[in-house]
Image: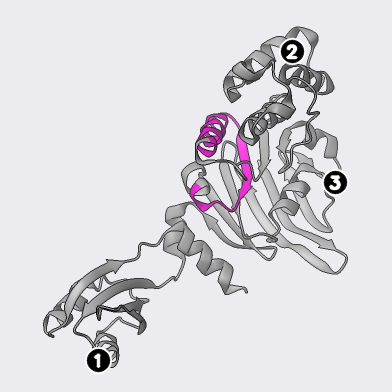
Amino acid sequence: MIHVENLTKYYDSFCAVDQINIEINKGEILGLLGPNGAGKTTTLKMLTGYFKPSAGTIQVNDYNIEDNPLEIKQMIGYLPESSPFYKDMLVYDYLEYVSKIKGIKPSDRHPRLRYLADLCGLNHIMHKAIGELSKGLNQRVGLAHAMMNDPEILILDEPTQGLDPNQIVEIRHIIKKIGQEKTVIFSTHILSEAEATCDRIVIINRGKIVADGNTAELKQSTDQKTIIQLSLLNAETESVQNTLTAIEGIDRVESISRTDDGVLKVKAYSSSTEDLREKIYRTIKATDWVIIEFLQEAKTLETIFRDLTRQIN
């Protein structure tokens, strides 16, 4: 549905987006992740036609962003990070005003507003001024605005930024519901949101794509090391390091700290695909060390994100 090839954006001599290539399928919920300044917002603004690319192409169905910008914009609903509202207007009046701007026929306006009020949970605030609403409710009004012309594609820039946990869950539920019928692209640096909401995750860092896939695929594709945390009593640092690094598959052992009651905390790093916990346990059992803690860090989206965004720094 959306084909992006060698998409590039310069601000003077600074390259904000560097030759990005993405294929986005119809009906996908795609999360664009990256640290602040990675190029997420610039990418989304180019997809919406708000920014003109310095180089590269964006094609939506049979339309090209350079030759057919209006046709593509009519297919897209866009919620920027800071929604531009008229804060003195009532929610109902504002959405009715948006429906007129979007060219909704008079006979279709009220049914459309009722549908969006139900979808976005606005029925109880339609009579309130936008300036009186919380940020979470403002985001719901913004979603209704973006969905007014029933777009095929919904693009959301940091839709859960600054919301409390309950509001985040509410917006997540709405996005997933919309994603049953629409193609949704949203940027975020809240990793739990992407993992809970998205069919696919694209991680961008310094303007380049460093990972693309669902969570399971990202875990398989990264070469991140397995980390095993140990807390040991009656153990000396040098002896622990020598003993554990002698185990086949252990790359290195790092001493973290020693507590006041004498517990030594260490981390063992391994790039092996083998589960080494049994070997480590049997090795320690042959000594007089006492295991206080024995944990293997799971490979999560957070650790993958940190690993990938550090590689280019």
The mark that comes first in sequence, 3 or 2, is 3
Callout 3 environment at 10 Å: few (<14), some (14 to 19), or many (20+)? some
3D distance between C-alphas at marks 3 and 2: 32 Å
Asked whether 281 falls inside the magenta stretch, the response is no
3D distance between C-alphas at marks 1 and 2: 75 Å
3D distance between C-alphas at marks 3 and 1: 65 Å
Tell me the SS state at disc 2: helix
User: For residue 13, what is the image quadrant?
Assistant: bottom right
Depth check, mark 3 against mark 2: the one in front is 2
In the picture of the structure, the residue carrying the numbered disc 3 is 66
Q: How far across and how far down the image is residue 303, in percent?
A: 46, 64
In the picture of the structure, the residue carrying the numbered disc 1 is 239
Q: Which region of the structure is painted magenta?
A: 167-192
Depth check, mark 3 against mark 1: the one in front is 1
Q: Quadrant of the C terminus?
A: bottom right
In the picture of the structure, the residue carrying the numbered disc 2 is 109
Q: How far across and how far down the image is residue 216, in percent?
A: 42, 54
Residue type indicated by callout 2:
Arg
Q: How far across and how far down the image is residue 247, in percent?
A: 24, 85
Asked whether 175 falls inside the magenta stretch, the response is yes
Using the image, determine if residue 185 lies above or below residue 265. Answer: above
